[in-house]
Image (cartoon, grey):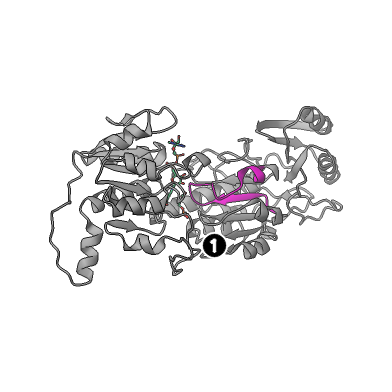
Amino acid sequence: MESESAIDGTSLDLGPAKAELSRRVSSSLNFSTSPHPPSWPKSGDFARAQSFVSPKPLKPFNTADFKILLLENVNKTGVDLLEGVNYQVTSLKSSLPEDELIEKIRDVQVIGIRSKTKLTERVLKAAKNLIVIGCFCIGTNQVDLKYAAERGIAVFNSPFSNSRSVAELVIGEIIALARQLGDRSNELHRGTWNKVSNGCWEIRGKTLGIIGYGHIGSQLSVLAEAFGMTVIYYDTVNLMALGTAKQVPTLEELFKAADFVTCHVPELPETTGMIGREELSQMKRGSYLINASRGHVVDIPALINAMRSGQIAGAALDVYPSEPGGNGDYFSNDLNPWAEDLRRLKNIILTPHIGGSTEEAQSAIGIEVAQALIRYINDGATLGAVNMPEVSLRSLTIDEPNHVRVIYIHRNVPGVLKTVNEILGDHNVDKQMTDSRGDVAYLMADISDVSNTVIKDLYQRLEGLNSRIMTRVLF
Ligand SMILES: NC(=O)C1=CN([C@@H]2O[C@H](COP(=O)(O)OP(=O)(O)OC[C@H]3O[C@@H](n4cnc5c(N)ncnc54)[C@H](O)[C@@H]3O)[C@@H](O)[C@H]2O)C=CC1
Ligand SMILES: O=C(O)C(=O)COP(=O)(O)O
């Protein structure tokens, strides 16, 4: 698999091959007061780091040459952290149409997205300089993770920073549906007083069925029990129940018992169309359905029919098979052919994918993903990557001035380590770590007492190997 190395911005002549020689800006920092592990930089530290000048005679790649494109209104916390390292950051409020995305992604080493931007193989093929993707959200289904890994492009996300926000939204929706709040509020907005108790319920004593008992589902379970609900859940994995919740062995069993069914599964081939006509018919008559996971999980035309027939008494949808690119765009039949029918139903809450959209969640996600990107760019650490083996060495310190960090991402085939170590073996390898995940392996080694010529030689010899996906040399 051919892949291009990332950056060329150094004073070294590396010939036609592109090298990335990156100054490790965090190396002079003291993290002793940080709540994070030592290699996790804190907000604010990076500005100080800029004053660190390598004592080596090499003129390293400057972080200011590093281009980052952020889409979909990534939170200011993340933008500030990345700008604080002096990267060139462009931040846009919405996603981009695919052709425009392809134009823009050609030029950048890093892209940051949320749930809307699809980084397909076609898009990533154009991303000749890309080394890392930051998903400033939980879901990573919008990225072709396998293809990215084959190209040596690491992908990071924020696995739980918005889980609480989604769980709280769902609690609000359960009560709003049980009391038909949306309809009453709309009626009075139009001037109609409609005081009714018919078909309106307390949620105390009702049963909540959670499909997918991960970060969000389990958090929701705790909140729901605090409201006096009985909680049952279905998950493909056998998971510890929180509180007095009970795992049920089949979806049918969950549908039979639940007054409210809520979906918290990732988008996978198995979860696509998971709630369709058959499943809706297995639910209790007059029960409620909530989907804040991914748009393809629920078959919406089947839901429309089930609501028209009274089988389902109310629904809340936060996600849709096709979602508009930005705020102000119209949610029309052009986007989803049933949009008008959906909007005409009673007791249905339609929200524009806001499950994770709180100040708390977005601020935390901005910091978490920006820090992961900085660690990867500057130190090569893949901890938390969703498509690469997790490899990390402690940051090089100022006491190790003539070291380089070699990162060799390669195809996971027999004999590579022997060959690489023959190349590195001519030098003093201070520390080394390697791991593989599927077809891709990631090797990191710190080498001491290196000169300009040695760096160039190491780089060129590694680049010449058949197994190579990407070579980076950080110093
Ligand atoms: N509406 C919004 O703004 C947000 C939506 N999400 C969506 O919610 C999803 C779930 O998020 P988390 O709870 O953080 O994920 P998670 O990975 O912690 O939990 C997902 C759970 O679903 C289970 N699962 C997978 N396939 C299943 C299947 N076929 N049947 C039953 N269970 C299955 C897994 O075993 C896991 O326990 C995310 O993948 C994302 O798509 C996440 C955050 C915000
Ligand atoms: O975190 C997720 O997976 C979400 O669905 C939230 O997406 P968003 O960041 O709001 O585009």
Q: Quadrant of residue 384?
A: top right
- Res. 280 image quadrant: top left
- Is residue 369 on the magenta stretch? no
Q: Nearer the viewer, residue 38 or 347?
A: 347
Tell me if residue 138 is in the magenta stretch. yes
Quadrant, the N terminus: top right
For residue 183, side relative to residue 251 (left or right): left
Disc 1 packing (10 Å; few <14; some 14–19; many ≥20): many
Residue range (magenta)? 130-149
Q: Is residue 356 visible?
A: no
Which residue is pictured at 30% across the width and 34% down the height?
A: 232
Q: Is residue 91 above or below residue 276?
A: below
Q: Position of residue 179 (x, y in %)?
A: 20, 53
Q: Nearer the viewer, residue 339 or 5?
A: 339
* Residue 57 shows in the view: yes
Place of residue 24 in the rendered image (x, y in percent of width and height, measured from the top left): 67, 47
For the residue pair 445 and 280, the one nearer the viewer reads as 280
- Left or right for 352, reference 348: right
Q: Is residue 351 above or below residue 35?
A: below
Label 1 sits on a secondary structure element that is: loop
Q: Is residue 354 above or below residue 423?
A: below
Which residue is label 1 attached to?
Answer: 95
